[in-house]
Amino acid sequence: MIVDRGADFPAEIESQLVAYGKDMWLFRDHSGQTTRALNSYKGDHRGFEYLTPRIRLTPFDLKDTAFANPRSLHFICSPSRASVIVSEIKAIDGWSPTTIYEPIPDRCVPEELPALIEVLPSISILSPNAEEALSLLSIPLPATKPKIEEACARFLEIGVGPGRDGWVIVRSGALGAYVASAERKGEWISAFWEDEQKVVDVTGAGNEYGQALLEKRTCHVTETRGDVASGHGRNS
């Protein structure tokens, strides 16, 4: 993983990262501040904002590093930004990774739907959460299983993946996850429950879910594994 390390990067955090294996990280130094952001939760509403200027990573940043041409790539951004990332992937000869795209929450608005339609044929797995999926398609909240199934069907009708062979996985909190492809009937995977007293922070659970899905290339094998990984990822 590439880490852009500003002059204020905490030494304690760096030590904790390196403890997992220094070969996992590529630290890049710059003179500015380390990018910081705030996740806030008010009831069921999640807020997110950058506190310092962000530094964008692109597939080209992996070139000529130990992480070049990975077999899978998970990115979280606006649909417009996803189009740029897909273009960079296609520009690198001999690289055809499995891709999982997670739309960034604040850009899951109907105005971004045309850009999403453009990029979906190049995505292996589309994985919004329930609220994001409904918002993109102008389906009113609250999220229910019938609405989520409708959203998934509409994405598949648009066409996901080269040859329309991609998957849609809608992460739906306590409802579980809904998984479908053009060739496989949709299926609900139950949420992975844990003692709530052991849950300290749900931040990053969705990311871990996506990474677990990419452990293998077949969603049929891995969606339950992804659900379990997400559940463990938010525990103390």
Image: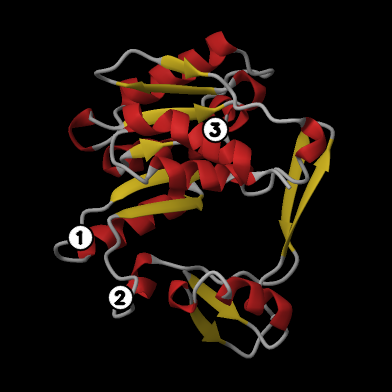
User: At 53% from the left edge and 31% from the top edge, which residue is drawn?
Assistant: 136
Question: Answer yes or no: do the residues labelled 1 and 3 have beta carbons within 8 Å?
Answer: no
**Quick check: 104 above or below 55?**
above
Residue behind mark 3: 110
Label of residue 95 in the image: 1
Residue sitting nearer the eye, 221 or 132: 221
Identify the amino acid type marked 1: Trp
Q: Residue 152 is drawn in which quadrant? A: top left
Residue behind mark 2: 63
Picture coordinates of residue 128, whole percent (x, y): 51, 35
Residue 144 appears in view: yes
Instruction: Work out how far the residue at label 1 is from the one at label 3, CA to CA, in angstroms.
Output: 32 Å
Picture coordinates of residue 75, whole percent (x, y): 45, 53
Q: Dot 2: few (<14), some (14–19), or many (≥20) neighbours within 10 Å? A: few
First in sequence: mark 3 or mark 2?
2
- Residue 97 is left or right of residue 101, and the answer is left
Residue sitting nearer the eye, 11 or 159: 11
* Label 3 SS: helix
**Front position among marks 3 and 2:** 2
Q: Residue furthest right?
A: 42
First in sequence: mark 1 or mark 3?
1
Identify the amino acid type marked 3: Pro
State the colouring used for the structure image.
secondary structure
Instruction: Work out how far the residue at label 3 is from the one at label 2, CA to CA, in angstroms.
Output: 34 Å
**Front position among marks 1 and 3:** 1
Q: Residue 93 is drawn in which quadrant? A: bottom left
First in sequence: mark 2 or mark 1?
2
Q: Dot 3: few (<14), some (14–19), or many (≥20) neighbours within 10 Å? A: some
* Label 2 SS: loop
Picture coordinates of residue 204, whole percent (x, y): 62, 49
**Quick check: 62 above or below 9?**
above
User: At 57% from the left edge and 24% from the top edge, which residue is drawn?
Assistant: 134
